[in-house]
Amino acid sequence: MDLLNNLALGFSTAFSLTNLLYCFIGVTLGTLIGVLPGLGPVATLAMLLPITYSLDPTAALIMLAGIYYGSQYGGSTTAILVNLPGESASVVTCLDGYQMARKGKAGTALGLAAIGSFIAGCFATVLVAAFAPPLIELAFKFGPAEYFSLMVLGLVGAAVLANGSILKAFAMIILGLLLGIIGADVNSGAFRFDFGISELQDGIDFVAISMGLFGFTEIMVNLQKGEARESLTEKVGSIWPSKKEFLKAIPSISRGTLLGSFLGILPGGGALLASFASYSLEKKLGGTNAKPPFGEGNLNGVAGPESANNAGAQTSFIPMLTLGIPSNATMALMIGALMIHNITPGPQVMSTNPTLFWGLVASMWIGNLMLVILNLPLIGIWVQLLRVPYSWLYPAILTFCCIGVYSINNNPFDVYITILCGALGYLFYKLRCEPAPLILGFILGPMMEENLRRALLLSRGDPSTFLTRPISLVLLMMALFLLLLVLLPAINKTREIAFQED
């Protein structure tokens, strides 16, 4: 009964004219970002964080969430029609989606991607609504020791599931932790690592570092690539799959939805991991007798991953909303948006801001419905946007970034930090270092330190408190198990193959 009352509150909040407008803006921007290669959701969210400062917190989060799961829809359009993923989670959609387009079945591929994403999105929203309250009840049993152990598990999970070398991922986490403790000490007030620079005494601004690492870096990387685009817009055809095709795709959509929903909750998980895992599963189940073979236009290779990436995108909100722990870089930016509005992320959000919590959950279902309406009829319009040269886009994006960073504190030093982080981000790209673990370390670092100190104060300096409390011990054991698992040669080799880029 409480769940129905909460959902009623959520829908009454989400159906307000203002929140509907921001939901529409979010999913439209998300689709546009997914369609245009070179503008990822993380970079865009980093760029738009300054705008949310002047918005109502509920409207801001609804818009940012719409951008995230909307980009999963839009990314499939370019993957299928241009063989160029507009968003990283759509990489696997290129394999079979583009081949379907070359055979004159672009419309079928786009239709299955949109329908599968809608079904997965609706299911994931139900999961968020159903599992959030019991998880919050569990979270209220957490003390400082449990929160510290949970953050350790989150960072280890993010490193294990990050792209590339696990050693580089841990190095990025440590760098993020170090950057996070710059500024005044919480307990003593002493300044740390400020090098006598007064602007660093309050720490590095989250918006500045995230916009530099993702926004500026994305621009530089795309200018370097300068990819040519071969469009198949004339061959889109009917966007509605036949009854036979739809029935064939239903098992893949179901498997992708369930797999993506689970992987989205894991630390370091989300849409990207879900789409790759779903494609691997479909390929294994299809076997060598699949007709057509995978990689040559098999519709299950589109329906499964597209369902998985949208389900993963939405269930990744569960740990962020209930525990205040980001499962990926996008959720770290969401936490940053909450902090901009002086809202402490964690289980108390549901009790102190129920309209924000349930309004966001209800807006996800509304947003998914808007996305189907947007994607299916307007595919032709989105495809026309692919003809806009990137050289026309990036000067406006850079200007927008700089104005946004400056507007938060009216401090030019933040712009310099953004430029420096952009250069660092490009260096990380060249060194094949994933910046997402750095952002997670930067967000969780101060929270980890605070909970570590509290736990040790309560135990009178006894570190065994982390091992004598059952929940804390279980979380640390899980983190250790993940570490040992990835160190096994067979597991590590499988992981490297899974994240290998063609």
Image: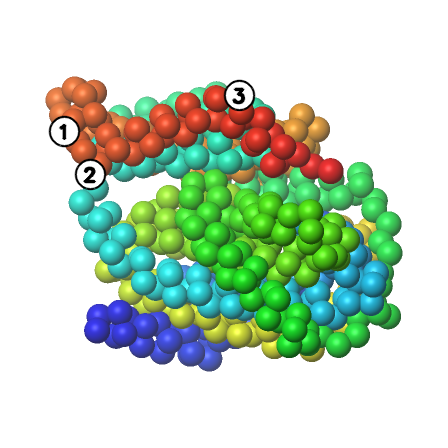
Tell me whether circle 1 and circle 2 mark residues in contact (CB < 8 Å).
Answer: yes
Q: Position of residue 191 (x, y in %)?
A: 37, 25
**First in residue order: circle 2 vs circle 3:** 2
Q: Where is residue 276 in the image (x, y as percent from the top left)?
A: 59, 46
Q: Which of 56 and 367 is in front in this view?
A: 367
Res 143 label: 2
Observer-side mark, 1 or 2, equals: 2
Relative to residue 36, is residue 170 drawn left or right?
Answer: left
* Figure check: 79 above or below 359: above
Residue identified by numbered label 1: 458
Q: Where is residue 264 in the image (x, y as percent from the top left)?
A: 46, 50
Give the amino acid at mark 1.
Answer: Leu
**First in residue order: circle 1 vs circle 3:** 1
Give the amino acid at mark 3.
Answer: Pro
Tell me whether circle 2 and circle 3 mark residues in contact (CB < 8 Å).
Answer: no
Observer-side mark, 1 or 3, equals: 3
Please say which color scheme the image uses.
rainbow
Q: Which element carries disc 3, helix, strand or loop?
A: helix
Res 489 label: 3
Q: Nearer the viewer, residue 101 or 184?
A: 101
Give the amino acid at mark 2.
Answer: Gly
